Amino acid sequence: MARFRVAEGAAEPPDDTGCGILHVDMDAFYVSVELRTRPELVDRPVVVSGNGPRAVVSAANYPARTFGVRSAMPFAVAKRLCPQLVCIPPTFGLYGEVSRGVMGIFRELTPLVEPLSLDEAFLDVSGALRRLGATPAALGALIRARVAAEHGITCSVGVARVKFVAKLASGMAKPDGMVVVPAAETLGFLHQLPVSALWGVGKRTEENLLQLGLTTIADVAAAPLPRLRRALGTAVGEHLYALANGHDDRAVVPDSAEKSIGAEHTFDVDRHDRAELALRLLRLAERVGATLRERGLRGRTVSIKVRFADFRTITRARTLLTPTDVAREIHRIAVELLTEHAPSGAVRLIGVRVEGLDTGESGEQLVFDSPEPRWRDAEVAADVARSRFGAAAVRPASLLTPGEE
């Protein structure tokens, strides 16, 4: 399986042609989130758990797992397995906040995001490749880099032609890696795995397959389908036979319509200068406005997210009278929120989000006495120019680097 793993800094990109499905899974999510502010514990066995007599482990880091400690294990059992285990009580609300930020990164790349839990999701990037000028593996690498930079945790990515294989691949990429299964090698990847790796095979089904003499996925793929139907039932037999032969027709289905669109930036060095932060907010507002217009959406609420040097994070929002997709308006509100609610302090991350989305089919409400120029018309024209001549073709003058004027 090592040949499918993408080495850091590999000279040649993997063959990911036709592999539009990504499965992204955070590594030891709850523990990783807590250890961002407890770096002295990174190499020690740590769990997130209560410590009462009935407490259950929510998550265990990889050093703890070497002792056999697992999530859903009674804490008392974990402590017996690893007496030096460090227990961190859960911080309620924190994991959801980080999850929303991570899922926001995914949705900046593609609207086809299917969360499975707080810490994992499927993405279908097939339709976004041309727009982003990237390959599936390149997007997987970008996701890993952004999650680490913006949220201080790591994730593992599986890239494949179908969902089932992508999920298997991300599990094999752990921790903090990426596995790409070329479409042409799907069966070669699958057929050496045990039958327990098939999606939907629990302990009882595994026992039934082993009694049939089927120990690997290759055995299931080669078995006569009528035999599998008789032994396992029609639905289960056909399901496992299809998976074993690399067939998985399930599409990536977003859990609901998009509720918000945002963009964030993590600074390499903490920033104090509010003028510099306002300029960064303009870059982010430009990205958010362009994405809204591309998807035919407008939003009623503009919010900012500010993470300080100590990882303390605030979010503040303001609701508009009418929905907007105009970057200038989004930026104006964002700067006002920054000035009012985060006037001082070193900033590690800053973000802008527009919520309360609709399709804008009701049209734009006009204000007859407004002296403002038609900024939306200008931004739509800029969208057209950028689509033809590249992302740098048109930008606000304040975003030009020295020497570009």
Image (cartoon, helix red, strand yellow):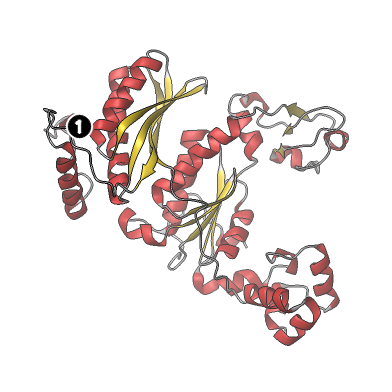
* Residue 342 is at least partly visible in this image: no
Name the foreground residue: 48 vs 320.
320
Q: Position of residue 221 (x, y in %)?
A: 67, 79
In the image, residue 12 above or below residue 402: below
Quadrant housing residue 169:
bottom right
**Secondary structure under badge 1?**
loop
Q: Position of residue 346 (x, y in %)?
A: 42, 17
Q: Amino acid at mark 1?
A: Thr
Name the foreground residue: 97 vs 277.
97
Q: Which residue is mark 1?
A: 401
* For residue 249, side relative to residue 389 (left or right): right
* For residue 402, side relative to residue 309 (left or right): left
* For residue 162, side relative to residue 366 (left or right): right
* For residue 45, side relative to residue 379 (left or right): right
Quadrant housing residue 235:
bottom right
Residue at x 18% of width, y 37% of height: 366
Q: Position of residue 344 (x, y in %)?
A: 39, 12
Name the foreground residue: 34 vs 351.
351
* Residue 104 is at least partly visible in this image: yes
Name the foreground residue: 63 vs 23.
23
Residue at x 69% of width, y 29% of height: 90
In the image, residue 374 above or below residue 92: below
Q: Quadrant of the N terminus?
A: bottom right
Q: Position of residue 89 (x, y in %)?
A: 72, 26
Residue at x 19% of width, y 40% of height: 376
